[in-house]
Image (cartoon, grey):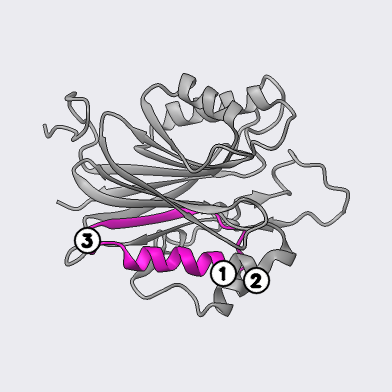
């Protein structure tokens, strides 16, 4: 059996599989915060993704994540207000470098967090962001998305690039920036566009937020993109699912107002 390339030499029982999670964990909601973040940690520990991209982390939540998810190393995209973070599972990853790219015109403290690492010996660039929120911020959000896509395109050719997060994206905004760049793929689309996992912020199913209107929106705010390494791809996305769908028995709320994404990749030998 092949070994997992990382800090641990235990045998890898999933040698041909890599899982990457992305989740806005709603750290700004003060209600049931401790119970909800424990629910997030339980989901991470149950699903055991190799990489986790997190948005809306606050220092209080970061401390719980580091305590309750001891199998992971946490790399944060900030220390003030709220920020992003990336978790790497220690037994299968090797960290190389971290970069934070500022969005200078953001009024919501947003940026782009990038991690260079290897996962099971495969070179990755991992990018996450929480793009500018709300409909009126469309111009700034499109500016940030273009910056992120430029970083994806400019990454070293020998690295697989994953860009995921809460992009607050409306489809028309993507059209307005001329779509996804060449050689970059929407993981939900390439895994079959399953309608039951399309909407990641769905107020018809998730009632964590109070909503005083009859019509309840549902949106695909959270997305994940891949740019394969060249000349030959090292991984292939094969399954896309949502996590955090069950209410916590402790408070009868969901861990977050967003569902998390969990993507399964086959390692191409």
What is the secondary structure assignment of the residue under circle 3? loop
Vertical order, 174 against 114 (above or below): below
Is residue 169 rendered magenta in the image? yes
Q: Earlier in the sequence, mark 3 or mark 1?
A: 1
Name the residue located 44 percent from the left edge and 24 percent from the top edge.
69
- The percent coordinates of residue 265 (x first, y second) are 31, 49
Mark number displayed over residue 143 = 1
Residue nearest the observer in this picture, 47 or 71: 71
- The percent coordinates of residue 223 (x first, y second) are 51, 56
Contact between marks 3 and 1 (CB within 8 A): the answer is no
Dot 3 alpha-carbon crowd within 10 angstroms: few under 14, some 14 to 19, many 20 or more: some
Residue nearest the observer in this picture, 121 or 171: 121
Contact between marks 1 and 2 (CB within 8 A): the answer is yes
Q: Label 2 belongs to which residue?
A: 139
- The percent coordinates of residue 116 (x first, y second) are 30, 48
Name the residue located 21 percent from the left edge and 25 percent from the top edge.
8
Q: Is residue 62 left or right of residue 255?
A: left
Dot 1 alpha-carbon crowd within 10 angstroms: few under 14, some 14 to 19, many 20 or more: some
Residue nearest the observer in this picture, 214 or 178: 178
Q: Label 3 belongs to which residue?
A: 233
Name the residue located 53 percent from the left edge and 29 percent from the top edge.
62
Q: Which residues are magenta?
A: 144-170
């Amino acid at each position: 059996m092949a070994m997992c390339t990382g800090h641990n030499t235990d045998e890898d029982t999933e040698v041909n599989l890599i899982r990457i999670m992305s989740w806005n964990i709603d750290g700004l909601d003060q209600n049931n915060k401790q119970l909800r973040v424990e629910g997030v940690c339980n989901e991470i520990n149950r699903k055991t993704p190799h990489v986790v991209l997190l948005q809306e982390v606050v220092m209080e939540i970061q401390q719980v994540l580091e305590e309750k998810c001891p199998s992971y190393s946490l790399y944060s995209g900030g220390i003030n207000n709220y920020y992003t973070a990336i978790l790497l599972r220690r037994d299968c990853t090797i960290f190389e470098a971290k970069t934070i790219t500022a969005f200078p015109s953001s009024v919501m403290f947003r940026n782009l967090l990038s991690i260079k690492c290897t996962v099971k010996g495969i070179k990755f660039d991992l990018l996450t962001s929480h793009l500018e929120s709300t409909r009126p911020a469309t111009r700034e959000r499109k500016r940030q998305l273009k910056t992120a896509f430029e970083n994806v395109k400019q990454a070293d050719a020998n690295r697989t690039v994953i860009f995921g997060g809460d992009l607050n994206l409306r489809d028309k905004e993507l059209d307005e920036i001329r779509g996804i760049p060449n050689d970059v793929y929407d993981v939900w689309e390439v895994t079959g566009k399953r309608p039951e996992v399309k909407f990641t912020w769905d107020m018809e199913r998730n009632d964590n937020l109070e909503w005083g209107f009859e019509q309840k929106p549902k949106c695909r705010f959270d997305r994940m993109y891949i740019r394969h390494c060249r000349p030959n791809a090292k991984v292939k996305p094969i399954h896309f699912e949502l996590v955090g769908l069950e209410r916590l028995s402790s408070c009868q709320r969901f861990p977050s107002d967003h569902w998390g994404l969990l993507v399964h990749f086959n390692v191409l030998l």
